[in-house]
Image (tube, rainbow, N blue to C red):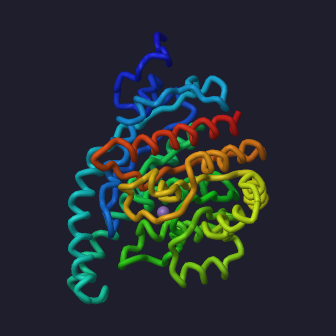
Amino acid sequence: MDYNPNDIGIPNGNYFAFPYTVEESEIVLLSVPWDATTSYGKGTASGPEAIINASTQVDLYDFDVKDAWKIKTGTIPIEKAILTKNKVFGKYSDDIISLLEKGISVEDKNVSSLLEKVNKASDEINQWVYNESLDWLNKGKIVGVIGGEHSVPYGLIKALCSKHESFGILHIDAHADLRNAYEGFTHSHASIMFNSMKFKNITKLVQVAVRDVCEDEIEFANNDDRVIMYHDFQIKQDTYKGVLWDKQCDEIMTYLPENVYISFDIDGLTPEHCPNTGTPVPGGLRFYEAVYLIKKLSDYKKRIIGFDLCEVSPGDTEWDANVGARILQKLINYTHLCNE
Ligand SMILES: [Mn+2]
């Protein structure tokens, strides 16, 4: 093979312009360009393509993971039919939201008939992600889902539940995503963890950098002892009192079982890292705080069984996608390290 990791990446449609086929890869990346339930700022459906484009500029040397460029990572080509479907149903959801904003109830017939359509489409996306994920898991691959809004990893999480008796989720996000449906969307981006926690295989959900939640979500977290929420202000207060991030990460690790799934919403980072994401919130983790937390999983001999990266939304510049690509690179490298 004449692949030279020192050369610039020649765009070939793959993340990081890797030359590896999906079949020969250890890690496979499944793009899900879907943002039809996003209420505030759409655009994450273009995330996968933007990350692919930005990732060709990322150098592959990793100071912490030896020979990172040799980690065989394959790209499942973006399914154009999902982009088309997203356009159709995104329009419906815009109509729903403008009706709701006029004070019309979700029970209103005009709203509910549109909701039914979008919810059915969400189910179909979930089923597709589940089928694809299970297929690759059965072939011994580790699957990473690239969104899209944060509803899209549901199918992967479900597929992992059929492969693993138990695992924990490390969830980095500005939001708790514990809403029981949002604006009538059962598979809303704001409900991914509420929906996932119905799987009893998930023995822990450790949420980090949460800072924008509603009362119901706090109640859910308080009533389910599997949920551990490290809200962002608590993290910052401990930091101001002199508690090192290193020690905070050590404590986070004590809650996680051996098998860990990482759900990474880019808005868990500070908004400077993701100015165009759907629902940016002040505060959050800086880039290397997040990387350090992920690295801790390998220090603690946890096994990363899968991951998602969601809510990256390209703006007028490549910045959001650039940061997303670099988070993705770290997710890949530490996943490999954990599974060696
Ligand atoms: Mn989220």
The image shows residue 314 at horizontal and vertical percentages of: 33, 48
Q: With 168 as the anchor, is 195 left or right in this view? A: left
Q: Would you say residue 257 is visible in this rendering? A: no
User: Count the marks: how many?
Assistant: 0
- Between 206 and 143, the one lying in front of the other is 206
Q: With 192 as the anchor, is 113 left or right in this view? A: left
Residue at the spot 75% in from the left edge and 55% down from the top edge: 244
192 relative to 28, above or below: below
65 relative to 104, above or below: above
The image shows residue 149 at horizontal and vertical percentages of: 40, 58
Q: With 60 as the anchor, is 201 left or right in this view? A: right
The image shows residue 315 at horizontal and vertical percentages of: 30, 50
- Between 246 and 111, the one lying in front of the other is 246
Quadrant occupied by the C terminus: top right
Residue at the spot 70% in from the left edge and 39% down from the top edge: 338
Residue at the spot 67% in from the left edge and 64% down from the top edge: 235
- Between 10 and 226, the one lying in front of the other is 10
36 relative to 146, above or below: below
Residue at the spot 40% in from the left edge and 65% down from the top edge: 279
Q: Would you say residue 104 is visible in this rendering? A: yes
The image shows residue 6 at horizontal and vertical percentages of: 49, 17
